[in-house]
Image (tube, helix red, strand yellow):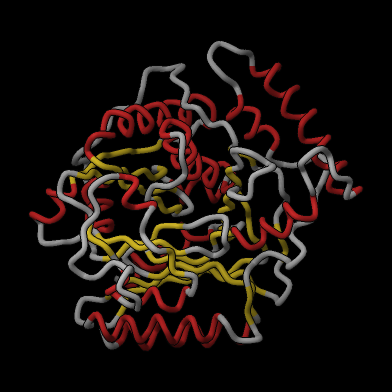
């Protein structure tokens, strides 16, 4: 570890201090607590999750659920004018952290997203803002690190138990943010869902969640995480997206969701649909032909898409979406069962045959487009249900 990296006692103050944190390019190193910096007490945690997501999944609406979770991140990023803030995508929700000076911005973004999701997606989302000071007063901590899967993007990793505590507080009704009035609309520029489901190449798309158990030490959980990552990096597993990127499809099942996200102000949904369909058709033709259009190079974009994809993360635990063989899925689940039996972890896993991608692309000619991956048939939400049954 270099002297420039954050230590266990370092603390962030302003948002630009987060962006200045040295980015870790090896995911396996993120089990090292010394790489995480403490958030100050005057920061706030924004939380969101879909109410009754299990029912929505049963109705085949997981693409809408994923879109709702990603919308929180897009709305905050667009109001801030930057993606350089700590956030995490959770499948049926999201979390983020901002300095107290941006609390009003965060509150407005959460309220407007909750209103839009109810109006346009017919889903209920609970949202909350929890002060970091309240998290620490309850005996937890919030520490962050930056992981850079490529030279273009970075994602926040969280440790300390504070994010899990804040989510539990939200679910019991504390620190709630009221949804905005009907018709309130967030700025969701760049949010898209054009790719079809991505079929498993090795047989299984495995969604995994593991969090520290009631009697395990931090070192024991770190060892478990390292063992899981070693299995995930074997020849029997890989990222749930082809090396050449997902194939473009026409028409995309996500066009209606994108149109609803693209509608602004009092504009009509029909006009938004027309704009989105024309843009998506042009995009499909460009990707199919491979033609460069101005500064946009489809081959470069697809390479960046693969590199930038967010398919594993730490948010007070380990989450992964893997394309793996059934035999490796068996070994991962056996390892999780053994860790649960020892109290080292509480865990949940869910198998499916394909993955979903939800994208936030502020500019197609810049390299900083971000792509969230989840299982297509329940994903992290189903894994979380399994975790609750085991806890």
Q: Quadrant of residue 147?
A: bottom left
Query: On screen, 97 above or below 149?
Result: above
Q: Quadrant of residue 383?
A: bottom left
Question: x, y (%) of residue 50?
Answer: 42, 43
Query: On screen, 238 above or below 116?
Result: below
Q: Nearer the viewer, residue 330 or 131?
A: 131
| Residue at the top extreme of this rendering | 266
Question: x, y (%) of residue 340?
Answer: 32, 82
Residue 35 falls left or right of residue 10: right
Residue 10 falls left or right of residue 97: left
Query: On screen, 286 above or below 258?
Result: below
Question: x, y (%) of residue 327?
Answer: 61, 87
Q: Nearer the viewer, residue 137 or 253?
A: 137
The number of numbered discs placed on residues in the rendered structure image is 0
The quarter in which the N terminus is drawn is bottom left
Q: Is residue 385 visible?
A: no
**Which residue shows up at 61% across the image and 66% down it?**
352
**Which residue shows up at 58% across the image and 60% down it?**
375
Question: x, y (%) of residue 68?
Answer: 50, 40
**Which residue shows up at 50% across the image and 31% down it?**
122
Q: Is residue 230 visible?
A: yes
Query: On screen, 378 above or below 1?
Result: above
The quarter in which the C terminus is drawn is bottom left
| Residue at the front extreme of this rendering | 3
**Which residue shows up at 72% across the image and 28% down it?**
276
Q: Quadrant of residue 137?
A: bottom left
């Amino acid at each position: 570890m270099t002297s420039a990296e954050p230590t266990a006692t370092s603390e962030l103050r302003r948002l630009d201090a987060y962006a200045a944190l040295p980015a870790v390019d090896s995911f396996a190193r993120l089990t090292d607590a010394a790489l995480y910096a403490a958030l100050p007490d005057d920061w706030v945690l924004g939380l969101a999750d879909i109410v009754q997501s299990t029912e929505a999944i049963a109705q085949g609406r997981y693409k809408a659920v994923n879109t709702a979770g990603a919308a929180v991140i897009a709305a905050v990023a667009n109001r801030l004018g930057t993606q350089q803030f700590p956030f995490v995508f959770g499948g049926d929700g999201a979390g983020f952290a901002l300095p107290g000076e941006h609390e009003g911005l965060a509150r407005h973004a959460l309220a407007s997203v909750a209103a839009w999701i109810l109006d346009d997606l017919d889903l209920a989302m609970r949202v909350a803002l929890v002060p970091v000071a309240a998290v620490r007063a309850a005996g937890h901590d919030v520490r962050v690190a930056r992981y850079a899967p490529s030279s273009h993007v970075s994602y926040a990793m969280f440790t300390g138990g504070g994010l899990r505590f804040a989510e539990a507080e939200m679910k019991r009704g504390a620190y709630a943010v009221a949804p905005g009035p009907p018709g309130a609309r967030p700025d969701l520029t760049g949010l898209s869902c054009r790719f079809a489901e991505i079929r498993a190449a090795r047989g299984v798309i495995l969604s995994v969640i593991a969090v520290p158990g009631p009697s395990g030490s931090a070192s024991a959980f770190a060892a478990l995480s390292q063992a899981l990552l070693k299995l995930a990096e074997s020849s029997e597993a890989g990222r749930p997206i082809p090396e050449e990127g997902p194939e473009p499809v026409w028409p995309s099942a996500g066009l209606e969701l994108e149109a609803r996200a693209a509608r602004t102000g009092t504009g009509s949904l029909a006009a938004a649909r027309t704009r989105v369909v024309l843009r998506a058709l042009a995009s499909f033709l460009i990707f199919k032909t491979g033609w460069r259009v101005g500064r946009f190079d489809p081959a470069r974009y697809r390479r960046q898409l693969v590199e930038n994809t967010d398919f594993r993360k730490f948010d007070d635990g380990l989450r992964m979406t893997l394309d793996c063989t059934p035999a490796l899925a068996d070994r991962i689940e056996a390892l999780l069962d053994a860790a649960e039996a020892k109290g080292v972890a509480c865990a949940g896993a869910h198998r499916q045959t394909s993955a979903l991608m939800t994208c936030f692309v502020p500019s197609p000619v810049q390299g900083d487009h971000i792509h969230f991956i989840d299982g297509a048939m329940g994903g992290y939400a189903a894994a979380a249900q399994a975790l609750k049954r085991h806890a």
